[in-house]
Image (cartoon, rainbow, N blue to C red):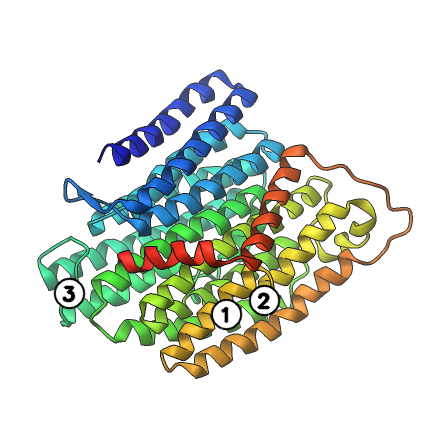
């Protein structure tokens, strides 16, 4: 019990300590403070895997929450390094993102549905302000994200009312099949489909991603989406586990989201819009695990969420660097191999991993997801997933080809040390756990089993 309390106390110290650094406007001190506390929380999160306790009937400390805590802490650590390099308002980013972290902990360690609702709001609202402060032209992106998030909030609140009508409880426990529970299920899929970028609720996200600074885009795809999926897994796999309908709905969302993301990405020239549609298609692959309706399916989802988070953050780190030089389209990537070898290697690696190249985390994640579909007698869904992976080759290949094409008079372009460290971390994760996947698979299995 003391370990869990220490973890939450340190999280509160991080959030409220950032208020001091925001007041002092000391970028370097704020950055050091955040790195130290995030690293300490990351180390502490591994000790939570051995705990299974419920505090005050509200917080449930278990392996599922510990898996997401470790993932989100490491992601936020890298996002802080990226924002420190490119944000003129880093202190605001650090303060707002630390409260986002508190919200994410409320979601992943929740034992009651209202706490998930509060946690999601605490993740979304600071994200809106981060988008707003990221560039001078981000007002439209922030407003669109606010509107779509408000729709999610309304749907989630109504879903909770339906759920209480079906079970008379707000706890994360199974409900019987009634008209109220089916209504709640539909509304939860709408609300959390928005948070996890499922089609058709993701149609505004490419505009939001393009209109934000690249480091804020990295946060939306590498942090916010992970929290949305954590909430979706918790609600659907626990509350509605006894029903078959969620599996059919998830399969439908998977097909629509994969095809929408991949087909729309084929026509894109802007790098952030392309990555936005790529991220949507990845959400379609991930929800295949929910359609499998099994512990192994959840395990596959967790691994792919881990893989996607660092692939997306890594790719956006390169795009952030390009954006700082006024380069935003695929044509602007031409000559990259002559300007910076590390950026070229990283970008090519991350895109190949998103396709599903062997010996990378992207391959392992997709293999587990498709295998979970086959084991659940959803062979057709696995085949459609493979077909979509083939489609994705065409738009990823455009970027890879451009980055490996020489350009006359290309000169070496330096990269900030914090961005170099982000790329090295993401490259290491992608290759190390693509070849030796068993540690993450074991953590994911323990997390799935704890549900």
**Mark 3–mark 2 CB contact (< 8 Å):** no
Q: Quadrant of residue 85?
A: top right
Q: Residue furthest left?
A: 168
Disc 2 marks which residue? 356
Judging depth in this view, the residue of 251 and 445 nearest the camera is: 445
Query: Which mark identifies residue 348?
Result: none
Whether residue 407 appears in this view of the structure is yes
Task: Name the residue rendered at 11%, 55% in the picture.
Answer: 169
Cα distance between the residues tagged 1 and 2? 8 Å
Q: Nearer the viewer, mark 3 or mark 2?
A: 2
Task: Name the residue rendered at 46%, 20% in the picture.
Answer: 21
Whether residue 305 appears in this view of the structure is no
Query: Which mark identifies residue 367?
Result: 1
Q: Residue furthest right?
A: 409
- Work out whether 267 lies above or below 333: below
Q: Earlier in the sequence, mark 1 or mark 2?
A: 2
Q: Earlier in the sequence, mark 3 or mark 2?
A: 3
Q: Residue furthest top?
A: 24
> Which quadrant would the C terminus be assigned to in this image?
bottom left
Disc 3 marks which residue? 175
Task: Name the residue rendered at 54%, 29% in the picture.
Answer: 89
Q: Is residue 268 shown left or right of residue 94?
A: right
Cα distance between the residues tagged 3 and 1? 32 Å
Residue 311: percent from left, percent from top:
57, 53
Q: How crowded is the residue under tag 1: few (<14 C-alpha within 10 Å), some, or many (20+)?
A: some
Residue 137: percent from left, percent from top:
58, 41
Q: Secondary structure at mark 3?
A: loop
Q: Is residue 133 shown left or right of residue 113?
A: right
Cα distance between the residues tagged 3 and 2? 38 Å
Q: Is residue 418 shown left or right of residue 73?
A: right
Q: Nearer the viewer, mark 3 or mark 1?
A: 1
Q: Earlier in the sequence, mark 3 or mark 1?
A: 3
């Amino acid at each position: 019990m003391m370990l869990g309390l220490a973890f939450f106390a340190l999280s509160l110290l991080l959030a409220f300590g950032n208020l001091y650094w925001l007041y002092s406007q000391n970028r370097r001190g704020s950055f050091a403070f955040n790195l130290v506390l995030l690293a300490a929380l990351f180390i502490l999160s591994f000790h939570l895997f051995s705990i299974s306790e419920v505090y005050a009937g509200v917080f449930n400390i278990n392996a599922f929450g510990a898996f997401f805590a470790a993932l989100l802490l490491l992601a936020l650590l890298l996002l802080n390094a990226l924002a420190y390099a490119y944000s003129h308002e880093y202190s605001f980013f650090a303060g707002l993102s630390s409260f986002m972290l508190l919200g994410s902990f409320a979601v992943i360690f929740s034992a009651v549905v209202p706490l998930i609702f509060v946690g999601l709001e605490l993740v979304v609202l600071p994200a809106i302000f981060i988008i707003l402060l990221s560039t001078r032209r981000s007002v439209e992106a922030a407003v669109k994200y606010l509107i779509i998030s408000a729709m999610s909030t309304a749907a989630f609140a109504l879903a909770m009312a339906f759920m209480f009508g079906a079970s008379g409880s707000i706890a994360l426990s199974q409900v019987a099949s009634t008209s109220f529970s089916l209504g709640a299920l539909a509304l939860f899929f709408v609300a959390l489909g928005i948070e996890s970028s499922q089609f058709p609720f993701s149609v505004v996200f490419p505009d939001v991603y393009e209109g934000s600074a690249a480091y804020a885009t990295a946060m939306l795809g590498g942090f916010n989406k992970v929290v949305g999926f954590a909430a979706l897994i918790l609600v659907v796999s626990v509350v509605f586990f006894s029903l078959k309908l969620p599996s059919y709905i998830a399969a439908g969302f998977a097909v629509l989201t994969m095809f929408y993301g991949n087909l729309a990405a084929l026509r894109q020239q802007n790098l952030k819009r392309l990555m936005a549609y790529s991220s949507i298609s990845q959400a379609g692959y991930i929800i295949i695990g929910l359609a499998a309706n099994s512990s192994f399916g959840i395990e596959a989802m967790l691994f792919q969420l881990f893989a996607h988070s660092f692939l997306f953050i890594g790719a956006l780190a390169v795009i952030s660097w390009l954006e700082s030089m006024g380069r935003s389209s695929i044509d602007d990537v031409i000559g990259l191999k002559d300007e910076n070898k590390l950026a070229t290697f990283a970008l090519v690696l991350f895109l190949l991993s998103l396709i599903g190249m062997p010996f990378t985390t992207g391959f392992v994640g997709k293999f587990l997801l498709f295998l979970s579909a086959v084991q659940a007698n959803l062979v057709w869904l696995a085949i459609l997933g493979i077909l979509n992976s083939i489609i994705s080759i065409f738009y990823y290949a455009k970027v890879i080809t451009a980055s490996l094409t020489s350009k006359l008079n290309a000169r070496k372009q330096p990269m900030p040390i914090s961005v170099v460290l982000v790329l090295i971390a993401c490259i290491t994760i992608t290759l190390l756990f693509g070849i030796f996947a068993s540690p993450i698979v074991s953590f994911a299995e323990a997390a799935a089993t704890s549900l």
